[in-house]
């Protein structure tokens, strides 16, 4: 056996592991798996992220793997990926004929309906990985250009290892700093139900004091808020924040209401109970991570990690002797569009630090209008200022627009799409859908091929950073859309920052091997997440 060979690996119920290679199986501990990892560096074929989580509990971590569930989602789309279903799909069984797992999917259970797979063990994981590899190779041969599907499958699999580590390690959060921030926004920690009600009433009163005499109501009821605003002479069709924003500078009531909404969201979703539930005694905030949302393939996290209010980022502090390296991909969607479409003119624009400037010059408009045009093109906006600007794109960048339009047409017709890296995007229902629904599906399709490809590039970058910064004792602690947060010893922070930038160039060469697209990242070093984002 040589480095990179596929080896089946299965976590057993007793805390041990089974390893399979070419028909032979052996049992071992997490420590023995770690020793084999160190000596041989195979590519472990596992059924799902669950194996990595069990290894971490045993004190072992893998460098690479082939995650059958992750690659299944790439090949077949959607979220469902339990072992029996993945095996059956690989053997051509219709999805509707495979019974869904009851309750939590048992990835290591008997799959009576799956052909040639009486028990989905380590050997079956190895066989499934080989079948997936063959399917991806065949698909890649059918494609003209585009990314290597096998390379994408590998990075998607390794992203699941990263997700297992993110779930286990958590995000550094200073509890004292977090509690001080909460106290300033929603009041002190309540001592009981009566105290909580009094604090809530005081928060409401800061809005209602600006109401006209005799006017009031429940601020948590949109209908009553609308009536309250009407009493103050503000007649609006609804009370959405964006609609009220235009009134905040001339109405103390609206300004106080918008501030109240931010505090109320934090109180109900990110308050003391949230902190107590998810922040461990070691000062790490933990949630469950997965490498794909089942749609276009974005990484997801629970426990509010992907939606934390900006004000609370001040409490995300590096531990003593450490700093954060924050890296955020710049203008990633238009750069990805240039890569996946093969539009030479748009590719040339990516050479600029701010690619909207050459796009603006090409369109004969100012920079803000060029940005609107690009976003409108990718989201299918056809009316208003964005629609007018997007129509100019057709003359300047016909190849890129043709790529988006083709995705739009296929989605409207109910034909499945694939991203640049090969992820299946399921579309259906064209024969019975209304024109409005078809149009909405078209807009989704044209955007999903860009969002999905961007997600694939991001994960390839993230797993490269994971590998290259490990010798520095650095670790990724957050992946947020197009942003990485790396926790690193202070004395190695600048070296890590340079590596993160180099990893983007390395990942881009693998993901878009023609090398005509320039990808950029804003990289900063700081002690707090908030400081790094400023």
Image (cartoon, rainbow, N blue to C red):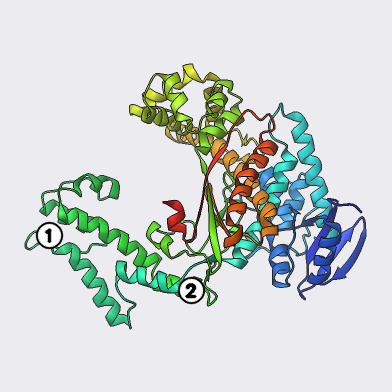
Does residue 205 appear left or right of residue 72 in this picture? left
Residue 31 locus on image (x, y percent)? 80, 71
Residue at 60% from the left image edge and 67% from the top image edge: 169
| Above or below: residue 199 compared with residue 219 | below
**Does the rendering let one see residue 460?**
yes
Q: Is 70 positioned to the left or the right of 451 in the image?
A: right
Secondary structure beneath label 1: loop
Q: Mark 1 or mark 2: which comes first in sequence?
A: 1
Residue 433's spot in the image, x, y percent? Answer: 48, 35
Residue 339, labelled with which disc?
Answer: none
Q: Which residue is mark 1?
A: 211
- Give the x, y percent position of residue 38: 82, 62
Give the image quarter of residue 167: bottom right
Whether residue 456 can be seen here:
no
Q: Secondary structure at mark 2?
A: helix
Q: Nearer the viewer, residue 115 or 67?
A: 67
Residue ID at (73%, 57%): 83
Q: Residue furthest top?
A: 395
Q: Kindly identify the residue that appears in the image at 67 percent across and 49 percent down.
A: 464
Q: Quadrant of the N terminus?
A: bottom right
Disc 1 crowd rating (10 Å Cα; few below 14, some 14-19, many 20+) is some
Q: Which mark is residue 277?
A: 2
Instruction: Name the foreground residue: 139 vs 95.
Output: 139
Looking at the image, is 367 positioned above or below residue 465? above
Cα gap from disc 1 to disc 2, whole angstroms: 37 Å
| Residue 515 drawn at (x, y percent) | 66, 30
């Amino acid at each position: 056996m040589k480095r990179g060979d596929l080896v089946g690996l299965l976590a057993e119920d007793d805390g041990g592991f089974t390893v399979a290679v070419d028909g032979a199986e052996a049992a071992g501990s997490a420590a023995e798996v770690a020793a084999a990892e160190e000596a041989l560096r195979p590519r472990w074929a596992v059924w799902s992220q669950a194996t990595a989580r069990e290894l971490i509990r045993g004190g072992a971590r893998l460098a690479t793997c082939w995650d059958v569930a992750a690659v299944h989602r790439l090949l077949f789309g959607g979220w469902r990926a339990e072992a029996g279903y993945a095996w059956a799909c690989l053997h051509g069984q219709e999805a509707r004929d495979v019974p869904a797992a009851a309750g939590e999917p048992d990835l290591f259970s008997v799959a009576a309906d799956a052909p040639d797979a009486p028990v989905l063990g380590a050997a079956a994981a190895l066989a499934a990985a080989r079948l997936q590899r063959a399917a991806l190779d065949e698909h890649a041969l059918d494609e003209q250009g585009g990314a290597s599907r096998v390379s994408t499958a590998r990075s998607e699999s390794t992203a699941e290892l990263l997700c297992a580590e993110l779930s286990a390690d958590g995000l550094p959060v200073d509890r004292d700093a977090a509690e001080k921030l909460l106290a300033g926004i929603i009041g002190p920690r309540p001592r009981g139900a009566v105290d909580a009600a009094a604090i809530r009433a005081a928060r409401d009163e800061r809005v209602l004091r600006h109401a006209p005499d005799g006017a009031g109501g429940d601020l948590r009821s949109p209908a009553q808020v609308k009536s309250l605003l009407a009493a103050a002479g503000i007649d609006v069709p609804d009370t959405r924040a964006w609609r009220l924003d235009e009134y905040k500078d001339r109405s103390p009531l609206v300004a106080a209401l918008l501030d109240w909404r931010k505090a109320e969201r934090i109180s109900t979703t990110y308050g003391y109970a949230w902190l107590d539930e998810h922040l461990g005694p070691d000062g790490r905030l933990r949630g469950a991570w997965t490498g794909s949302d089942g749609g276009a393939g974005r990484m997801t996290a629970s426990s509010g990690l992907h939606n934390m209010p900006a004000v609370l980022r001040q409490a995300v502090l590096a531990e003593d002797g450490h700093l954060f390296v924050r890296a955020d991909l710049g203008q990633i969607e238009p750069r990805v569009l240039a890569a996946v479409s093969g539009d030479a003119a748009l590719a040339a624009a990516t050479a600029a630090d701010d690619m909207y400037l050459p796009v603006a010059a090409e369109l004969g408009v100012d920079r803000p209008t060029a940005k609107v045009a690009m976003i409108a093109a990718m989201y299918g906006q056809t009316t208003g200022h964005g629609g007018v600007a997007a129509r100019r794109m057709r003359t300047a960048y016909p190849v890129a627009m043709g790529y988006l339009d083709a995705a739009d047409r296929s989605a409207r017709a109910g034909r499945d799409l694939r991203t640049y890296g090969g992820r299946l995007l399921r579309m259906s229902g064209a024969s019975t859908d209304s024109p409005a629904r078809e149009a909405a599906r078209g807009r989704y399709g044209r955007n999903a091929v860009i969002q999905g490809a961007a997600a694939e590039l991001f994960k390839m970058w993230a797993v490269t950073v994971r590998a290259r910064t490990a010798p520095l004792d650095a670790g990724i602690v957050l992946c947020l859309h197009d942003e990485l947060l790396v926790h690193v010893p202070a004395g190695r922070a600048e070296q890590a920052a340079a590596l993160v930038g180099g990893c983007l160039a390395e990942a881009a060469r693998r993901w878009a091997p023609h090398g005509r697209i320039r990808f950029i990242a804003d990289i900063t070093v700081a002690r707090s997440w908030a400081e790094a984002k400023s």
